[in-house]
Amino acid sequence: MHILLTGSTGFIGHTVARALTQAGHTVHGGVSPTHRGTSALQVPMDFAHDTNAATWLPRLQGIDAVVNAVGVLRDTRARPIDAVHRDTPIALFNACAQAGVQRVVHISALGIEGSATRYAQTKLAAERHLLSLTGQGSGSKNVGAQSIQTPQSPQGTHSPLSAAILRPSAVYGKGGDSSALFMNLARLPVALFPGPVLDARVQPVSVHDLADAVVALLGPAITQTGVIECTGPAALTMGAFIASLRQQLGHGPAKVLRMPQLLTHLSARAGDAVPASPWCSETLAMLGNDNVGNPAVLEQLLGRPAVHYSQLVASAWR
C-alpha cells in the first residue's frame, strides 16, 4: 500500500515508518516545511496551519491509507494544540473521505475520556469526527476482533473509509522525551516526585509494539475498526515504574521523596509560564490520573504478548 504517514520524523512516527517499510509498504512521510531532506517520498505539511481539507487533497493522490502520528503535549504559539490535535486532523480526515482513501489509523492517547484538559478535549474531538465519517459514532469501541463493524457514512450509505484509533498508555522507547525523562529520573540515587505522579497507575507500552499494531491494522487486522486500547501486559504506579527502570539499569533502590502538595501545584503553575517546559498544570492533571486498560486487546492485535515493563530497557531503549 501507499501510506501517508504524518509526523514521520517524530519519536513514534519514525518507528512506525520503519515498521511499515519493513512490512513492504511505501511510506510517504509527512515532514515540517522547514525539514531538510532528500527523499522524494517526503511530503511537506504544517499541522499548525493546514486546517482546510482542500490543502490535503493533492497530498492524497494515489494514497491507499493514512496514519496520523502527530501530537503535542501542550499548547505553544508555534504548535497550537487546537490546530495540531483537532482542526488539522479533522481537515485531513475530511479530505480522506473526499479522496476515497480506504483506511485511516489515528494514534490518540489512553485516559482522555473524562479529562477536562485541552490535550484530552482536542484529542477526543478529532476521534469523534473521524468515527462520524465512518458512521461509527462517538461511542464505538473495539475490544477485539469480535467488535469489527462495517463503516457507514453519516447518511447511512456505504462509505469506503474505515478507521481504527489506537489509544496507547505511556509509550516507552529510545528517542521519546518522556522516556528520556524517566531514564534520567531512574539514574538518580535520590529523587523528588509530585505525589499524584508517584501514585498514578500506568501500563507502559513499547514503541515497537505500538508500531507493530499499526502494521497489523494495515495488514492482517485491516477490517478491525473503532477505538483500540494499546497497553502493556501489566499496570503499576509511576513510582514503581521508575524503580523498575532503575533496576533494569543495574542500580540499587533509590531514596524517593514525595513533593508536598503545595509545592507540586506551585511548580506546575511555574511551568505554565515556560512554554518549552513539559511540566505544567495540564501535565500534572494528566499524569495524576490512572492510564490503564485491557492488555488482551493489544495481545490479540499483535498475535503475541506485548513487551513487559520489566524488559523495556533491553527491548525498546535502542
Image (spheres, helix red, strand yellow):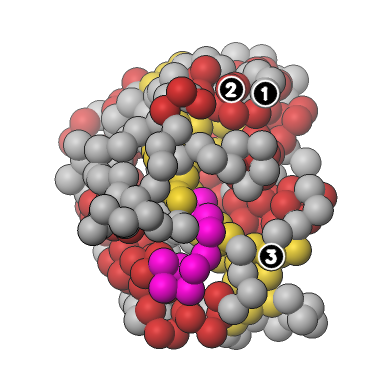
Tell me if I can see residue 75 in this picture.
no
Q: Residues within 10 Å of mark 1 (few under 14, many from 20)?
A: few
Which of the pair 38/59 is nearer the observer?
Answer: 59
State which quadrant residue 153 falls in. bottom left
Q: Nearer the viewer, residue 215 or 44?
A: 215
Give the residue at mark 1.
Answer: 303
Amino acid type of the residue that numbered disc 3 sits on in the rendered structure: His
Within the image, what quadrant is residue 274 found in?
A: bottom left
Q: Is residue 93 left or right of residue 59?
A: left
Furthest-front residue in this view: 157
> Which residue lies under the disc numbered 2?
300
Q: Residue at x 59, y 78 (%)?
A: 61
Q: Which mark is residue 2?
A: 3
Residue 56 in the image, given as x and y percentages of width and height: 47, 79
> Is residue 28 covered in magenta?
no
- For the point 54% across and 84% down, which residue is it? 58
Q: Reading the chain from its start, which is encountered first: label 3 or label 1?
A: 3
Bounds of the magenta segment: 96-105
Where does residue 166 sit, x and y in percent of width and height?
47, 41
Q: Nearer the viewer, residue 299 or 158?
A: 158
Q: Is residue 286 left or right of residue 106?
A: left
Q: Alpha carbon of mark 3 to alpha carbon of mark 2: how far?
A: 25 Å
Cα separation between marks 1 and 2? 5 Å
> Is residue 101 part of the magenta span, yes or no?
yes
Q: Between marks 3 and 1, how big is the CA–CA gap?
A: 24 Å
- Give the numbered dot on residue 45: none
Residue type at numbered disc 2: Gln
Marks 1 and 2 in Cβ contact (< 8 Å): yes
